[in-house]
Image (cartoon, grey):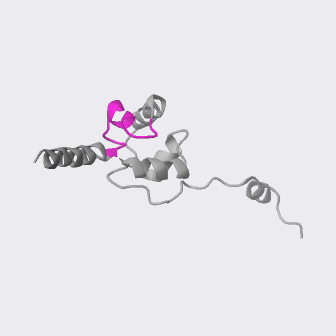
Amino acid sequence: MFKKVIATLAMCFAAVSFAAVDANKGSAADLDGLKGVGPSLSKRILDARKEGEFKDWPDLMQRVKGVKEKSAAKLSAEGLTVNGQSFNGAAAPAKASKAAKVAEAKPAKQ
C-alpha cells in the first residue's frame, strides 16, 4: 500500500513539474522554473513582453536576445510555449545576407 502511495505522489509530482509555461502569461518565477531559463533570460522575456504579447515563436526569437532556433527548440522541449504553441522549427524571418545586399546595391553591367 505504501509503495502505491509513493508511486502516485511521484507521478503527480512529475506531471506538475512539466506544466507548460506560456511566454505571454508566465511570471518571472514560472519562467525561472524551466530548465534553461535563468533570471536574466526571464527578465529579457518579460521586458520584451512589455512592448506587446508575442504573436508566435519567430516573434519571440526576434525580440528576445539570445533565443534562436536551437535554444527555442530546447526551451519548447522543457515546456515553454507561445500562445499555447510549442516550437515547430519555423525560423525567425531571415536577415538579408551581405552578398545579397551587395548584389542589390550594384546594378548588373550590360
Whole-percent x, y for residue 9 in the image: 18, 44
Whole-percent x, y for residue 110 in the image: 89, 70
Report the residue that reaches farthest toward the left.
Answer: 1
In front: 11, or 101? 11
Whole-percent x, y for residue 1 in the image: 10, 48
Q: How many marks?
A: 0
Residue 52 seen anywhere in this rendered image of the structure: yes
The picture quadrant where one finds residue 43 is: top left
| Residue occupying the point 48% across, 53% down | 73
| Residue occupying the point 44% across, 52% down | 57
| Residue occupying the point 34% across, 42% down | 24
Provide the residue span drawn in magenta: 21-37
Please tell me whether residue 87 belongs to the stretch shown in magenta: no
The picture quadrant where one finds residue 6 is: top left
Please tell me whether residue 28 belongs to the stretch shown in magenta: yes
Report the residue that reaches farthest toward the bottom.
Answer: 110
Residue 55 seen anywhere in this rendered image of the structure: no
Query: Left or right: where does residue 45 sit relative to residue 20?
Result: right
Query: Left or right: where does residue 77 sit relative to residue 8?
Result: right
| Residue occupying the point 60% across, 55% down | 94
In front: 39, or 25? 39
Query: Left or right: where does residue 4 sit relative to residue 31?
Result: left
In front: 99, or 10? 10
